[in-house]
Amino acid sequence: MTQGAKATATHRNVTAAHDARTADRSPPTTPDPRARTAGTHPAPQRVNGTIVRPTKKQLRIIRTQGARAAKEARTQEAANAQIQKEDKARNNNSRKRPATEPTAPNHTTALQLAHEQGCDIVCIQEPWVETGTKTQNHPAYECSSPVESWNNPDTVLEERPRVLTYTRKTTRLRVCRHRTIPSRDILWISVNDIKILNVYRAPGTDEVVDYVISLAPHPGTIIGGDFNAYHHTFEPGVDNRYRGEEIAEWAATTGAAFIGEPGVATHAAGHVLDLTFSNIPFTRTVVRADLDNGSDHLPLITTIPGRGTPPPERQLYHVPDGNLERFAGLMRTAVMTLPDVQSIRSPKELDEYAATLTKLFDAAIEAAGHPPRQGQRGAPWWTVECARERHRWLKEDRTPEGRKRFQNTVRQAKRKYWTQIIDEVKDDKDLYRIVGWHKLEPRLKSPPLQTDGVTIEDPLEKAEALRRALLDRFDPSDDLEYDPLDPQHWHGCERIPWSTSLSEEETEHNTIRVSSTSPGKDQVTVRLLKACWQHVGPLIHGLYCKCLHLNHFPTVWKTAEVVMLPKGGKRDKSSPRSWRPIALLSHSRLESSATSTWGRHLDAPPWTSWHP
């Protein structure tokens, strides 16, 4: 388990309705007890006016066979009545169950338990959702949905997704969502080139089964979910119903073998309804009753050998607060090895000096920091009381009342956590963040892009498509035909005032007194600069002045990381126009300092209007 990537098929279905076609639901004809004996032992007949009656031996055989046939008929009638009763109850539950709060604790508990087990992928069927494109989230996971939004209160039950797939937030996983048929019951994703299909088959429908049995799975595929089908391959001794035979035949002919545990119930009623198929060698799925989250379906854990094809990992480091003093000491020692900044005489020397300083920052961050623990943070509201009440329900009070008490404990823990966050507001910044919770966009993984009629799914290809669509819209042909500052065309003042000097106060204000904390490629944040400013401040001030004096911006500081952020109010995230590029520069704030000093020394020229 510890060697492979683990994926949970946390089949968290609130309903357990079986799917059936009309023909499957009609009860079989009840056998007539008399039909078993009529052919061999006919009724008494009149021969030549005389009634010929059966002998005592024949009557004994007739009575024995008739009693046996009647018993079989009563047993069959009882079985058919029970099946119809279960189907009716489950269909009623499916129609009546709204997407309301009582199921939210099951959903959130499933995510927390999966996180504690170290699962990389969590597949959930029949999740908890609410109007406004809301569902349950977890700090360690990103959520993918087959539906982009569900905002209409009147149609939320028809629009809501019935499958969600969560993937762990880590650079070791390259996640790609695929666009298939428009269905809220089917969701394809790829994780490190391993294709995973999450399905939910609703009662009375055939769409999901028709889609699955039409597939010819590529190598490295896993298909799992709630199929609501019966077959003796999955559950020995059960009658083949609800298209279970077609599913078993498809698995046998395509090589997508059933990798679950035959006969081990996945539902509280004692049947195997949740199925997992795969053509990856040595992949297996087990039922984990010990991870019960309060649903009527038990969790399944699928173990995949290896981790597929992981992406190239970029090693990033985080300096914790306890190591800031050590980081400052490393930078103090490092800058002592640099020559005097006043010795710089040319743009080439300026480039080399800035590059050396950037390398010193990188070395100090690596020495004082450690790789960030991505996807390792659990749900902050999951308390000791939640774990204790769940253990009590599983081990001591396995009753509906015990489960309800556990769910109420989870609900109260979440409410208490958020109430405490609100009560601890100290300043306007905290208040602004809390108010922003009500305006947050749904935290769903971005869908495939649609550009020029082409669907783009791979993350790297999506990044390249956004770059072309948003950043390469202009070319040299869009340049001005002439330089407006050329003396032949310029008729303003003779020169623009320009100063090549900066005060230390201006440098400090524009470098470490700013609100932006997003680092660029060099990962040097304002927080780190503040920690070592007493050692590097004079050096950076002199370097900025040299840049202004030589009229040169160091090459190493020109590289920016471009992050695409979704625009607010844009629902179609598949369009490049729904994304806004944000450039994250390196730790240099030279451009801010230059703008500040330029504005300070620039007098109002005749070609502008001044509004005090």
Image (spheres, rainbow, N blue to C red):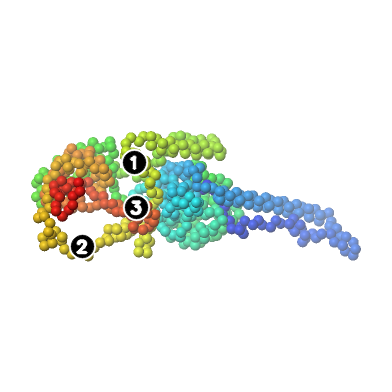
Can residue 544 be seen in the rendering of this structure? no
**Where does residue 462 sit, x and y in percent of width and height?**
34, 57
Horizontal side of 144 relative to 508 (left or right) equals right
Q: Residue at x 49, y 56 (%)?
A: 257
Dot 1 corresponds to which residue? 432
- Name the amino acid, label 3: Lys
* Mark 1, other Cα within 10 Å: few <14 / some 14–19 / many ≥20: few
Residue placed farthest to the right in the image? 49
The answer to whether marks 2 and 3 mark residues whose Cβ atoms lie closer than 8 Å is no
Q: At which x and y percent is residue 376?
A: 37, 43
User: Hey, what amino acid is under mark 2?
Assistant: Asp
How far apart are the two marked residues, 2 and 3, measured between alpha carbons?
28 Å
- Mark 3 falls on what kind of element? loop
Which comes sooner in the sequence, label 2 or label 3? 2
29 or 117: nearer the viewer: 29
Q: Secondary structure at mark 1?
A: helix
Which one is earlier in the sequence, the residue at label 1 or at label 3? 1
Q: Amino acid at mark 1?
A: Tyr
Q: CA distance from mark 1 to mark 3?
A: 19 Å
